Amino acid sequence: MKLQRTTLILILLALGLVGFVYFHEIKGAPQREEIKQKQQIFSFKEDDIQSLTVKTQNLTLNLERSDKSDEPKWLMKSPEVAPASNAIVGYLINLLVEGKSKRIISISANQLAEFGLDQPQATIDVKLKNQKTHQLILGKPDFNRRFLYAQADPPAKPGENTVVLLVSTDFENAVNRELSEWKQPIDDVKKPTPNTDKPTPANSK
């Protein structure tokens, strides 16, 4: 009887150990891998950025930080010269500064087409005040359109293995805009108010 009880305890301990290994090492592994792979896209800050070039299939836009303290903070240099929308440019910059990659995939150069990176929907070039440059290439959405495939600072030499990121689809919304949306809205011109200081004609007698 004592032997059976000891055997039963050992069996229960073994089952408990197997359960622990399963849930901690096997079932929990993808979650730990996902957390480990989730990382910041770039390490620069908003104030580090001097200029941006946004190239989509319909538009190439050059934006430069204004050196004047008054608004607007950003100026459009091409395709037109005009004040840029601080809200629209700020939205894109926030994504570049705060954006994180959900997952990282290592691929060979001949697989770029599978992720829409051979003919990207947009390319964002960032020039910092210290003259360093960074680039983000946006490919096609993943199968359920929750994320975009992207490359950050791709290798300069063709044929090298590269890393593909999964980034927020907010990047797609940030860059695919009409030219008019990038411009600073023009306030309605106020009509001059009537001059009330003019002397009133004297009462006729």
Image (tube, helix red, strand yellow):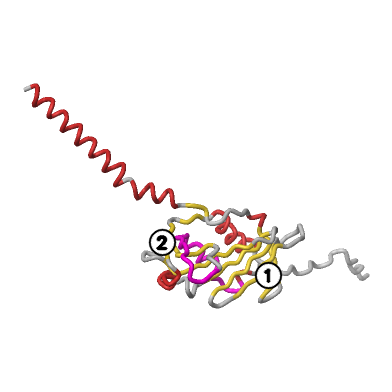
Residue 162 versus residue 18 in the image, above or below: below
Q: Amino acid at mark 1?
A: Met
Left/right of residue 102 with respect to residue 89 in the rendered view: left
Label 1 neighbour load within 10 Å: few <14, some 14-19, many 20+: many
Helix, strand or loop under label 2: loop
Image position, residue 86 (x, y; %): 65, 61
Question: Residue 191 occupies which quadrant of the picture?
Answer: bottom right
x, y percent for residue 204: 92, 71
Quadrant containing the N terminus is top left
Residue 13 rendering spot, x and y as whole percentages: 20, 32
Q: Which residue is mark 1?
A: 76
Q: Which mark identifies residue 146?
A: 2
Q: Nearer the viewer, residue 163 or 180?
A: 163
Quick one: which residue is furthest to the left in this view? Answer: 1
Q: Which residues are magenta?
A: 157-180
Residue in view at x 47 percent, y 69 percent: 139
As helix, strand or loop, the secondary structure at mark 1 comes to strand
Q: Position of residue 54 (x, y in %)?
A: 59, 69
What residue is rendered at 40% in x and 51% in y?
34
Q: Residues within 10 Å of mark 2 (few under 14, many from 20)?
A: few
Q: Is residue 70 above or below residue 7?
A: below
